[in-house]
Each structure stands twice: as structure tokens, then as C-alpha cells.
Amino acid sequence: MNLKKIAKDTAKTLQSYLTYQALKTVLAQLGETNPPLALWLHNFSADKIQDGEAYLEQLFLERPDLALRIMTVREHIAVEVAEFLPEMVLTGIQQGNMEQRRQHLERITQIDTSHPSLQSEHQTSLDPNSEQ
């Protein structure tokens, strides 16, 4: 397990996600102040936002002003969430793991009540005092 590569890949994914969140914020702002530009940005961004850095590079070629605006918003979001993110991620993973384990345990310990004859056969075979 290469933890350094995992951390690097995670950071890249988070950067792209924050770019997406910044885009959503800018689109909402433009929707109120400049709907035609919001429509243009929405159409431009379709199917391009998977890699945040590649997306910004393409946007710089078309509309540097919007690329700069999205980068500014992305950085602001990053600053605001960076303090809470590690603890929230760890807590979320721990809670998710606990819930998945609980559901799995419930599934594997359920008795199938839709076949009463199977249940009574199972109980009979477990009862040492039963007549066989």
C-alpha cells in the first residue's frame, strides 16, 4: 500500500471536487446577475469538470475572467473547509463502516420466516430433547 500515492490521488480528487463546487457557486451567482453568461458557462462546463485543473486550463483559453473567478471561489472554499475536513472524513468513514457492519450482521443472522417448515426443522435439529 503506497500511502503517499493514495494521499496525492485523494488531494487531486478533492481539488477537482472543490473546483466543481466553485463552479456551482459561480453559476448560481451568474444566474442572478448575468443569465446568458451563466448559460454559456454551464454549456462550456458540461462533461469537462472531472479533472479540475484540466477544466480550468481549457476555461482560461476561452474566458480567463471566469477561470480566475472560479479559482478564487475554490480557494475560499478550501480555506473554509480545510480545518474541519480531516476529522469529518475520519468520523464519516468510521460511522459508515459501523453502519455497513451492522447491516451485514443483521443480514447474516436473519431467520427466514417465509418458510416456516424450514424454521421448525432447523429448531428441531438444534433441540437435543426432540424426537427424531
Image: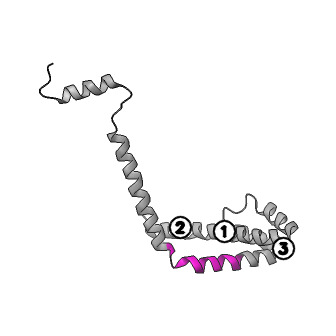
Give the CA distance from mark 1 to mark 2: 16 Å
| Rendering quarter of residue 74 | bottom right
Numbered mark located on residue 81 in the image = none
Q: Earlier in the sequence, mark 1 or mark 3?
A: 1
Residue at position x 71%, y 71% from top?
A: 25
x then y, percent, for residue 70: 72, 75
Q: Which residue is mark 2?
A: 10
Residue in the foreground of this view, choosing between 1 and 93? 93
Relative height, residue 35 to residue 124 (above, below): below
x then y, percent, for residue 11: 55, 71
Q: Would you say the magenta stretch is mainly helix, strand or loop?
A: helix
Q: Which residue is mark 3?
A: 33
For the C terminus, which image quadrant? Answer: top left
Q: Dot 3, crowdedness within 10 Å: few (<14), some or many (≥20)? A: few
Q: Dot 1, crowdedness within 10 Å: few (<14), some or many (≥20)? A: some
Q: Earlier in the sequence, mark 2 or mark 3?
A: 2
Q: Which residues are magenta?
A: 71-85
Numbered mark located on residue 21 in the image = 1
Q: Dot 2, crowdedness within 10 Å: few (<14), some or many (≥20)? A: few
Residue in the foreground of this view, choosing between 116 and 109? 116
x then y, percent, for residue 65: 81, 78
Query: Label 1 sits on what residue type?
Result: Gln
Give the CA distance from mark 1 to mark 3: 19 Å
Residue at position x 52%, y 70% from top?
A: 8
